[in-house]
Amino acid sequence: MSTSSSRISGFHNLTMTERLEKVIEVAGLNPDVSDHMGNTGNLAAEVADSMIENAIGTMNIPIGVATNMIVDKQDTLIPMATEESSVVAAVCNAARQCRDSGGFITSMSGSLMIAQVQLVDVPNPEFARLQILEHKAEIKQICDETDPVLLKYGGGFRDVEVRVLEGSHTGAMVITHLIVDTRDAMGANAVNSMAEAVAPLIAKWTGGRTYLRILSNLADRRLARARATWTLDAIGGESVRDGMLAAYEFADIDPYRAATHNKGIMNGVSAVVLATGNDTRAVEAGAHAYAAQTGRYRSLTHWEADQDGNLTGMIEMPMPVGLIGGATKSHPTARIALDIMAVKSADQLARTIAAVGLAQNFSALKALATTGIQKGHMALHAKNIAVMAGAIGAEVETVAKDLVKLGKVRVDIAEDLLNKLRG
């Protein structure tokens, strides 16, 4: 390991190749790293360099396609970018088991995002609240002038809300919410710009000082919903249904279980969000905040039995995704993923992603209630272990099958199996 300093003056001014060479030198890496990192795959180096600061290469994540999905009566292929085994298969299996009952039905609450403007040092905060509300027309004009393109496509300012919060150090804070319809854009840049434009006037009207001017990732005005029914015949009978309902109830009343339960949902959600070039961190943050909206962290899904005893599942969660702007527009793979899904609007994309989250949750609950989560997961994970042991080509499948048969998916055992296979 090199002891060179991480202080590299002018690093950002170097070309991508020069940056990589400098990192290899400073970190004391093998020069062969240059060939590996220099291969940026299907994302041109100049595009990668324009997307983030100090780029030196790309990280390729596998993209799989989940089949069997019917969303709002339309057969839909689902591209998913993930490194975790069993995620794609889980969606395929869940979708297959509810095809005969109509697949997934979805809806959306709207495409509204919230920008927050924080105001401090106001001696009469409730008075200031009304002062701000009285300027709604002026706020609307400023917001709409900030992004005329959004206005052109039917979006723009919709409403203003003002809250008074008590801080332990700063005293009363007056928080203005700009409610903006962002249409087919995720909307972060648009609402942030509006908050910046409105903030000086809020300070002027009230005599206070504005600090933060930023969107909220708790996009609770942009909720995607999905529901589906699985018949008893499809899932294997009442005992399976009851086991799944018990697993769901455990997650809904215990945050320790809910964290893993919702992580499983996000396995599917984030994989589609990433494949389409959308902001995985924004969606994850909004989902987990929404799961805690009652004051206790709970399940994002809800499961019940209908009058015929069939299993019914529902999901409702914030889904701030878009079709225009950011990586969704600039990353060629993201554009292909959207073409595979054949989505025509951000609304449709959000609803489809919610359906994927519900499907993912179904498969996880069913596995937990029957064979256990490890059996199916390890069958797929065994291939990763075989590769880690050095298997190549047809050896991967052979070693993986033997690992599963032994019930011990470990690298040391995979190495022994590989050595025997090679004689």
Image: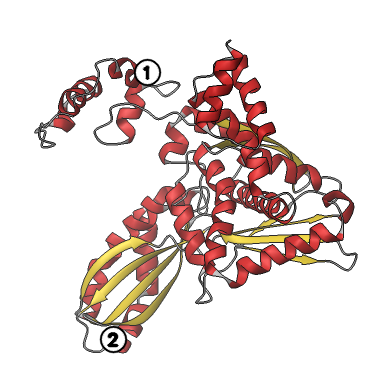
Spot occupied by residue 192 in the image (x, y as percentages of width and height): 34, 57
Q: Is residue 368 left or right of residue 223?
A: right
Residue in the foreground of this view, choosing between 262 and 418: 418
- Quarter holding the N terminus is top left
Residue at 57%, 63% (x, y): give it: 257
- Residue under numbered circle 1: 39
Q: Residue furthest top?
A: 423
**Of the residues under marks 1 and 2, which one precedes in the sequence?**
1
Q: Is residue 273 left or right of residue 401?
A: left
Measured in 3D between alpha carbons, the distance from the residue under mark 1 to the one under mark 2, in whole angstroms, is: 57 Å
Spot occupied by residue 113 in the image (x, y as percentages of width and height): 46, 60
CA neighbours of label 1 inside 10 A, class few (<14), some (14 to 19), many (20+):
some
- Residue under numbered circle 2: 125
- Local secondary structure at mark 2: helix
Image quadrant where residue 242 sits:
bottom right
Q: Disc 2 residue type?
A: Pro
- Quarter holding the C terminus is top right
The answer to whether residue 110 is visible is: no
- Relative to 129, residue 110 above or below: above
Q: Is residue 172 left or right of residue 9?
A: right
Residue at 38%, 57% (x, y): give it: 191
Q: Disc 1 residue type?
A: Asn
